[in-house]
Image (tube, rainbow, N blue to C red):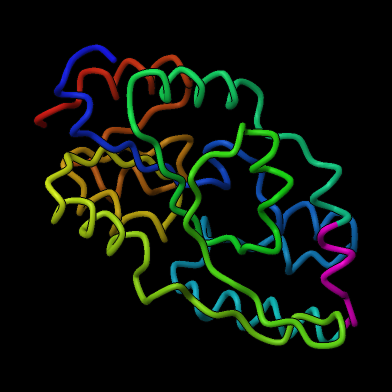
Amino acid sequence: MKGCLFLQRIIALDMEGVVTPEIWIAVASRTGISELRRTTREEPNYQKLMNRRIAILDEYKIPLSLIRDVISELDVLEGSRAFLDGLRRNYQVVLLSDTFEQFADHFVTQLGYPHLLCHRLIVEAGQITRFVPRVEDAKRRAVLGYQELGYHITAVGDSHNDINMLQQAEAGCLFRAAPGLPDKYPDLVSLEAYDELTEWIDFSAGN
């Protein structure tokens, strides 16, 4: 550790788009269903987005097993493992994601078993029927919970569903952000490369 200050900091990262590829875009490519390419980069309402995804899976009878097969063929984003390993040498790191327990194990293994907080799917006869949010506004509330324990939170995300988390944190950064988000939220730092992000994290204490 670089000093006792860093023991009081937690780095909260979104998963998809920050350290892993977008799962639903890969599923869309496999199935040919273009509507599944829509993510939180385009749709701010996560509940609406997931309800539509589940309806499409039901319509085309796409089982969880097919999605897990798609995920098993994906690699984490280039440089993301080294980026995470570097952070973990100096900080406590948590992934705050709107992915699901049933999707995440492949990436968790590739990333060296980071601490991940996410949601859960309800599956019946192999078919996804609904999802169970951990809590409403889970990312922001996780940040708030850590803050109530006395931690300084630095948060990083790329999409509409990350904004509440980024604004709740002491320091928030958009990373490879969805088009239009940096202009809409000019108060948030916006970066594109892991080395830039690491440097910003190192200097963001107390901001």
Residue name at image x 38 percent, y 23 percent = 197
Tell me if 6 is positioned left or right of 183 in this view. Answer: left
Q: Position of residue 116 (x, y in %)?
A: 50, 50
For the N terminus, give its image quadrant.
top left
Tell me if 24 is positioned left or right of 135 in this view. Answer: right
Residue name at image x 17 percent, y 42 percent = 151
Tell me if 56 is positioned left or right of 73 in this view. Answer: left
Q: Position of residue 165 (x, y in %)?
A: 30, 54
Which quadrant would residue 204 be assigned to in this image? Answer: top left
Q: Position of residue 9 (x, y in %)?
A: 22, 34
Residue name at image x 89 percent, y 81 percent = 60
Residue name at image x 70 percent, y 64 percent = 102
Magenta region, residue range: 60-68
Between 191 and 147, which is closer to the camera in this rendering?
Answer: 147
For the C terminus, give its image quadrant.
top left
Magenta-drawn stretch contains 24? no
Tell me if 32 is positioned left or right of 103 in this view. Answer: right
